[in-house]
Amino acid sequence: MRSIIAIVGRPNVGKSTLFNRIVGSRKAIVADEPGVTRDRNYADVQWEEGSFTLIDTGGFEPVSKDRIFIQMREQCQLAMEEADAILFLMDGKEGLTASDREIANILRGVNKPLFFVVNKIDVPKHQERVFEFYGLGAEKIFAISAEHGYGVDELMGEVVKGLPASDEEEWDGQATRVAVVGRPNVGKSSLINRLLGYRRVIVDEAPGTTRDAIDTVFERDGKRYVLIDTAGIRRKSRIGLRLEKYSIVEALRTIDRSDVVLLLLDAQEVVTAQDARIGGFIHEKGKGCILVVNKWDMVEKDSQTLVEFERRIYRDLKYLSYAPILFVSALTGQRVPKILNMVDDVAEEAKKRVPTSPLNRSFGLWVERRSPPLYKNRDVKLNYITQVSTTPPTFVIYTNRPEGIHFSYERYLINQIRKTFGFRGVPIRLHFRKKGKER
């Protein structure tokens, strides 16, 4: 279970640059104008012995009435609620501003580790710029240059030391963890209540690692499940934020803890940009996934409606084309009992292991049917394949030129694996390794 660190501060103080420096890639858009990052950006980071999810927020501008800045301020407020630690970034070139003071006052009300960071201290002689920031009452100010990396190691060393230890309960592997995620108002609570209405025995209810969430442990037909609900999203509806954009943090935590994820879609809206973002996280995390289209009772139908809906969903969620779709109504209970049957199937597919011998027999036929394209006018030879792990199913293919495998050919091989061996509902990972070279 990863802790969450949020970078907050006024626009144009270098938050995205610091995000990129910590992540080690150019994941965030960086430009020399205020308000470039208008939505949160996320990345999982391994820093020495610590692992965490880093959030790059839009600028926090308390005195601005501009609609975009108001939305960014709301993003930051939610990030502060969800984060386990906060990096408050300020601009050493511009100096301490009234907005910095106001942000600091807001942040002091958050009972979490708070790090005051002054950016754009690019050379040692700029250190004197830091002194005025002690007027905020901070015990320590971290002077850094996000652009050049100065001071970032010291800062992150202190941050990682203070991260809370995971309090996630370890299960014996007999229970399937099922996460229910989706935008607000798509019917998550109604679906969960309906699912639990079909239970045989409630075992217990215990606090989850997601703040304010309840993990419901229950049995059905002798099988044990842990239902993970994103209750924290519902609680925050009371603070009046426009939560359409802000459910990602809770979804991240919930997805991390699951075996199978139910991505709940609204039949009246089908797939939104937010649904696509959440779906992307499910795929990246390697989790089994079922696309559950709720409010199906509200849709006028003809003989082609279901087929057209499936086509639209897979078009908008291309990377989840392996995920089965269920059309349900949490209100009436239509097809809801089928969900746990499908969860069982997807969980088994995620754990499936294909023996090397039949795998390579099929692999030879796939390659014979369609050889990999030339790479720099040289042949790319594929020697053999083996499955190295499950959940998600991961395969290693040995070749003379790993760098020569085009993504379209990789997609072809994944499609052939699915066609021959299944793995419905789970992502497949392929790694190409040079023949004779050990891992």
Image (cartoon, rainbow, N blue to C red):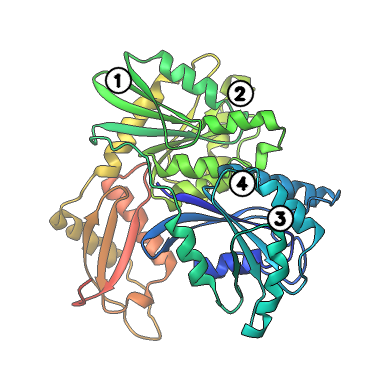
Q: Is residue 153 left or right of residue 227?
A: right
Q: Residue at x 35, y 42 (%)?
A: 424
In space, the residues marked 2 and 3 are separated at their CA atoms by 38 Å
Query: Three-letter amino acid code at disc 2?
Result: Lys
Q: Position of residue 364 (x, y in %)?
A: 22, 64
Q: Residue at x 77, y 68 (%)?
A: 33
Q: Kindly state the secondary structure of the residue where label 3 is placed.
A: loop
| Mark 2 or mark 4, earlier in chain | 4
| Mark 4 or mark 1, earlier in chain | 4
Which of pointers 4 and 3 indicates the residue nearer the eye? 4
In space, the residues marked 2 and 4 are separated at their CA atoms by 44 Å
| Mark 4 or mark 3, earlier in chain | 3
Please say whether residue 129 is visible from this viewpoint: yes
In space, the residues marked 2 and 1 are separated at their CA atoms by 35 Å
Q: Position of residue 141 (x, y in %)?
A: 61, 65
Label 1 crowd (10 A; few <14 / some 14-19 / many >=20): some
Q: Residue at x 54, y 70 (%)?
A: 21
Query: Three-letter amino acid code at disc 4?
Result: Met
Residues under numbered marks 4 and 1 in contact, where contact means CB atoms less than 8 Å apart:
no
Q: Kindly state the secondary structure of the residue where label 1 is placed.
A: strand
Q: Which residue position is annotated with label 2? A: 301
Q: Which mark, by number, is residue 219?
A: 1
Label 2 crowd (10 A; few <14 / some 14-19 / many >=20): few
Which of pointers 2 and 4 indicates the residue nearer the eye? 4
Query: Three-letter amino acid code at disc 1?
Result: Glu
Q: Is residue 424 above or below residue 28?
A: above
| Quadrant including the C terminus | bottom left
In space, the residues marked 3 and 1 are separated at their CA atoms by 44 Å
Of 20 and 384, which appears nearest the observer? Answer: 20
